[in-house]
Amino acid sequence: MKTYKLSLTVAEKQRLKQNKCRVGELHAYAADELCELLNTTTERAKNIAALIEFQQIPSVGPRFAADLVSLGYYSLNELKEMQGPELLNAYERRHGFRVDPCVEDQFWLVVHFANHRGNKNWWDFTTLRKAYRAKHGYPPDRPGHNWFESERYSGATNS
């Protein structure tokens, strides 16, 4: 049984305990069932269901699962017609900085997994990503600075 990393509230954890349910069992519940089980909002249940679904992909952790949700994706079905490069471009535009190339490999992985399942990991897509970028490059409006130069990662706090 896989344990998913979720930031559940104290009340949600209590509801799990009351219902004799473990975090590792939540993948069996649809969002509407999670809403009832956790006594939470529909939106919150939808987010939790998405985080669980995305963490079922090999080598995808809670942070990247949350990144997919932040881009507006809540299921693998929504990613089937996407492409890794377009997901990366949208992510970088949204955040305003360039990310580590392995993040693009993860985008390639989730699209592949949405269509084929399997047990590939993000690093299995490095060669494909490099070949694609050598041929197509990056969009001209790509952000100018890197992730490690941003406030989000420098340890600076927002006022």
Image (cartoon, rainbow, N blue to C red):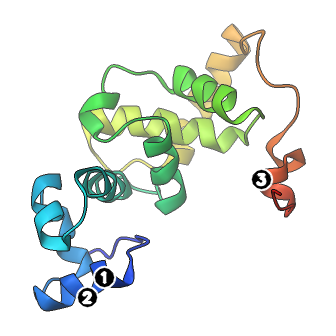
Q: On the rendered structure, is 70 left or right of 36?
A: right
* Mark 1–mark 3 CB contact (< 8 Å): no
- Relative placement, left or right, of 15 versus 53 is left
For residue 40, side relative to residue 57 (left or right) = left
- Residue 82 drawn at (x, y percent): 40, 21
SS assignment at label 1 = helix
Which structural element holds mark 2?
helix
Q: Nearer the viewer, residue 57 or 28?
A: 28
The three-letter amino acid code for the residue at tag 3 is Arg
Up-down relation of residue 108 to residue 25 (above or below): above
Q: Is residue 67 visible?
A: yes
Q: Which residue is mark 3?
A: 152
Which type of secondary structure does the marked residue at label 3 adopt? helix
Query: In the image, residue 53 lies at what x, y percent?
Result: 29, 53
Callout 3 environment at 10 Å: few (<14), some (14 to 19), or many (20+)?
few
Q: Residue at x 22, y 52 (%)?
A: 42
Q: Which residue is mark 1?
A: 11
